[in-house]
Every structure is written in C-alpha cells, then in structure tokens.
Image: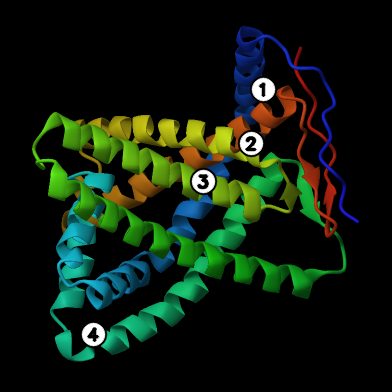
C-alpha cells in the first residue's frame, strides 16, 4: 500500500513559513540542475510544437470555426510578438491546406501523442528529480505505459482547458466590452485560474509522488503567478534584444525556443516551490507504491 501523507511538523507563523519556503526553493534551484533539464524540455517541446498546434487548430475548427482566430490571438498573446511569427507560420500552413484538414488533424494527433509522450516523460523525470524520487527497479515497461497514458490525459486536459477558456471569454464578451478594464481584469483572472488548474494537474498526476491537493493547489497558484510575471519579463527581454536576428527566416523559431526554455525553467522552479510549500506546511511529498525516494540532497544551514 502507498504511504499516507501525514503532517510531520506543527504549522509555523506565516512570515517564518515564507522565509523557509524561499530558502528551500533557492537551495533546490541551485542543486537540481534546472537549467539543463529545462533545455531538455525545450528540445522535446520543439519536436511536438508544430503537430500540437495543428491538433489544437483542428479541435477549435471542429467545435466552432471562429475559435481559430481566437486560438491564434491567444497564442500570440501568450508567446509575445517576436515568437509569434513561428506560431503564425504553422497555423497559416495548416489553414492553406483545407483539402487535407481532417487528415492533418488525424496525423497531427498521432505525431503529437508520440512527441508529447517524450515531452511529458522528460517533465516527469525532471519533477521526480526535483522531488528526489525515482521509479522502482524492474518496472520499465509499466512505467513507460503509465507515463504515456498520463501524457494522453494531460493533452486532453489541455484541450479541455482551451475550450473552457474560449467559452468563458465568449460568455464574458456578452456582458463586458472587450476594450474595458473590467474585461482585461477578468481575462487575467481566467488565465491565472486555468494555468493554476493545469499546473495543479501536472504536480498531482504526473510525478511518481503523492502530494496533498491543498499543497498542489497552493504550489500551482504560485507557479501560475510566477509564469505570468516571467512571461512579461521574457517578452520585455525578447523585445529589447536581437535574439534570432542572426538566423534570418528561422529567427522566429529560435525566439520561440528561447521562450519555451525560460517557460520550462519557470515550471521547474514552480515544482521546487511546491515541494518547499508541502514540506514547510508539514505534509512532505512521499513516493507512490511504484516509486522510491532518492538520496536526499544536503540542506544548507
């Protein structure tokens, strides 16, 4: 039977908790090679980027054709003007082939599932490393199948969140003007809520770990805030630098890879933060039945 999550320490005052969470997060960032793991995530993401966009475009067009434009606008807003060139190119190429649209969707589905399996397997391994976990020896095939099923589930969750986002935006647009401050505030709130839900699902389901839902939700909400702030910072950096300028027509892809790298780094930093939140709140993360704990990294005083 898997271990239960039991409190191991009484709660501390909020300010002391915050300091300890920050200290543990910084320590983990320095010792878990997050930069290298984020680079691996960016590489695997690049392999599945184009088919994933084709698949999302196909889903949006199947549900409501006008959602295609909303998908393009949302992605451009997410990655910023410099990286959006690559997004626009992929989506435009998909639209220019109407006779094979359904086939593109089916092929995109197969290729995306294969590519996303590698992405989520890498993400699973990275979060396991952050949380000092590893699969038990001797279960390689089961672990591989489990990781791929989780990848499929998270891909479906991503598509579901996209539909919820578009539906919520359409509903709000009935009552609020699109250029008003209220609209912008509601759009930001919806974005933070959906990213929090996605990160919570990743932290709760993907790693070989048991983590209490309250800790996963707190860590996911903080990660969503980090992601929003980081997205703004990355956008400012890319707009003021000449990243991709030396690569000519491929510059948009290079800029997108830089954006994906920093986004992956923020996600892994969020995993460090989530682990710190769970430990400081007295609910340490424990391995599932099919996993074991690695040798714990030494703490600095």
Answer with left or right where residue 71 lies relative to residue 17: left
Which quadrant holds the C terminus?
Answer: top right
Answer yes or no: is residue 241 visible.
no
CA distance separating discs 3 and 2: 13 Å
Query: What element does badge 1 sit on?
Result: helix
* Element class at badge 4: helix
Residue 59 image point, x, y percent: 31, 73
Query: Which of pointers 1 and 4 lies earlier in the amino acid sequence?
Result: 1
| Camera-nearest residue between 262 and 12 | 12
Cα–Cα gap, marks 2 and 4:
42 Å
The residue carrying pointer 2 sits among few (fewer than 14), some (14 to 19) or many (20 or more) residues within 10 Å by Cα, namely few
The picture places residue 270, in percent across and down from the top left corner, at 54, 36
Mark 1 vs mark 4: give the one in front: 4
**Residue at the image position 82 percent from the left and 34 percent from the top:** 296
Whether residues under marks 3 and 1 lie with C-beta atoms below 8 angstroms apart, the answer is: no
Mark 3 or 2: in front is: 2
| Mark 1: few/some/many CA within 10 Å (<14, 14-19, 20+) | many
| Of the image marks 3 and 2, the number of the one nearer the N terminus | 3
The residue that mark 1 highlights is: 24
Q: CA distance from mark 3 to mark 1?
A: 20 Å
Q: CA distance from mark 2 to mark 1?
A: 19 Å
Asked if residue 201 shows in the view, the reply is: yes
For the point 84% across and 35% down, the residue is 6
Residue labelled with disc 4: 101
3D distance between C-alphas at marks 1 and 4: 49 Å
Looking at marks 3 and 4 on the same chain, the residue that comes earlier in the sequence is marked by 4
Q: Earlier in the sequence, mark 3 or mark 1?
A: 1
Which residue is labeled 3 in the image?
Answer: 199
Image spot of residue 299 (x, y percent): 77, 22
């Amino acid at each position: 039977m898997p271990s239960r999550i039991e409190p191991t320490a009484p709660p501390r005052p909020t300010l002391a908790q915050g300091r300890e969470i920050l200290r543990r997060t910084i320590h983990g960032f320095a010792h878990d090679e997050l930069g290298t793991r984020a680079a691996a995530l960016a590489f695997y993401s690049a392999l599945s980027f184009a088919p994933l966009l084709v698949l999302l475009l196909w889903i949006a067009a199947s549900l409501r054709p006008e959602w295609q434009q909303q998908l393009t606008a949302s992605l451009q807003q997410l990655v910023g003007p410099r990286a959006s060139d690559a997004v626009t190119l992929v989506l435009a190429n998909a639209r220019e082939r109407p006779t094979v649209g359904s086939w593109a969707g089916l092929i995109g589905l197969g290729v995306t599932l294969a590519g996303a399996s590698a992405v989520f397997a890498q993400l699973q391994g990275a979060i396991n490393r952050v949380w000092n976990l590893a699969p038990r020896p001797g279960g390689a095939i089961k672990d591989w199948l489990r990781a791929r099923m989780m990848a499929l589930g998270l891909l479906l969750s991503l598509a579901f969140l996209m539909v919820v986002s578009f539906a919520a935006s359409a509903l709000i647009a009935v009552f609020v003007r699109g250029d008003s401050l209220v609209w912008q505030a509601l759009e930001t709130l919806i974005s933070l809520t959906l990213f929090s839900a996605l990160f919570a699902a990743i932290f709760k389901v993907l790693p070989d770990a048991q983590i209490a839902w309250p800790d996963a939700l707190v860590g996911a909400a903080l990660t969503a805030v980090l992601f929003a702030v980081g997205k703004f910072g990355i956008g400012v950096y890319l707009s003021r630098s000449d990243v991709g300028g030396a690569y000519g027509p491929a510059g948009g892809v290079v800029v997108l890879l830089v954006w994906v790298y920093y986004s992956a780094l923020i996600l892994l930093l969020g995993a460090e933060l989530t682990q710190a939140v769970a430990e400081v709140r007295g609910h340490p993360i424990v391995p599932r039945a099919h996993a074991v704990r690695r040798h714990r990294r030494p703490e600095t005083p």
